[in-house]
Image (cartoon, grey):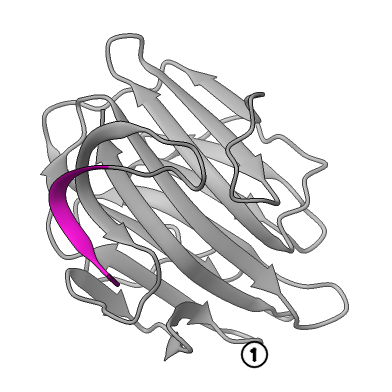
Amino acid sequence: MPFVSSVEGTYSFGRAKTGTIEFNYPNFASTTGLSQVSTAGISGDLLYLTFAVNGDTGNVYRSTAIPYNRNFTFEWNFECSGGTPTPADGFCLQWTTTNNTNGGGGGLVGLLGTTVQAFTFLTYTYNSFTWYKANAAQTPVTGQNFQRNLYYWADYNHSASTMKLYVSTTPTKPVSVTFSLTGFTFGPTSYYIGFGAATGGANANHILRSMKLTFT
């Protein structure tokens, strides 16, 4: 089944987690419920935000805005691969009030100015993770390696205002948290969740392989 929306179920890249599944794309044989903006497009059931060409930007969003002021787990599998000897530039995950606009190019990796919460996963020489809180960059975490095929989990606890991110090279969720954020919160506004990616004077393939949102 290529796409599941708003059903009860258990799934978590190899670790069971019970909750209400808002959407589930094990691959992108179906793009129902998505809004693609200047993306490279679907190839082999994978969603390419950019191919390995210079000066490209791509964004994809859910077509429907929903409130996120409740506990959830968002899981995704993203691959940055190929390209120039020093690949560029990475990707972002963002929650925005619009879903029809391309974000910034190069090191902005498709980030919009309307984000309420966002993360950037930079390659090139930056090799860093940065949390954008109300569109303001927080202190980056350097020394990262996102230029590969990785699995991600974002666990949001609304009452505690925390977000914990887990990253792994395998589909099994790690025990240890990779990035722990405090003071992370959503209000009652509805947002579109989406990804962006960009290349500049160097490039790489930026590939969204799967994603799933479960309210817990």
Residue 167 appears in the rendering: yes
Q: Is residue 153 above or below residue 121?
A: above
Place of residue 103 in the rendered image (x, y in percent of width and height, measured from the top left): 40, 66
Position above or below: 21 against 16: below
Q: Residue at x 41, y 36 (%)?
A: 16
Furthest residue toward right:
85
Is residue 2 part of the magenta span, yes or no? yes
Per the rendered image, the range of residues in magenta is 1-9
Q: Assign the N terminus to one quadrant of the image.
A: bottom left
- Where residue 13 appears, as percent x and y from the top left, is 49, 48
Q: In this view, does 99 lie to the left or right of 88?
A: left
Q: Quadrant of residue 8?
A: top left
Q: In this view, does 30 lie to the left or right of 16?
A: left
Residue density around tag 1, few if under 14, some if 14–19, many if 20 or more, within 10 Å:
some
The foreground one among 87 and 22 is 22
| Helix, strand or loop status at disc 1 | loop
Q: What residue is shown at x 82% (from left), y 58% (from top)? A: 125
Task: Give 71 or 132, whichever is nearer the viewer.
Answer: 71
Q: Is the magenta stretch mostly helix, strand or loop?
A: strand
| Residue at left offset 49%, top offset 37% | 15
Q: Can you say whether 69 is above or below 131 in the image?
A: above
Q: Up-down: is 105 above or below 195?
A: below
Kindly identify which residue carries mark 1.
53
Give how far across and how far down residue 9 sits, in percent.
24, 43
Is residue 104 among the parts visible in the rendering? no
For the C terminus, the quadrant is top left
Is residue 214 in the magenta section? no
The quarter of the picture where residue 200 lies is bottom right
> Which residue corresponds to the image point at 25% horizontal and 67% vertical from the top-left?
3
Hey, what amino acid is under mark 1?
A: Val
Most foreground residue, 160 or 120 = 160
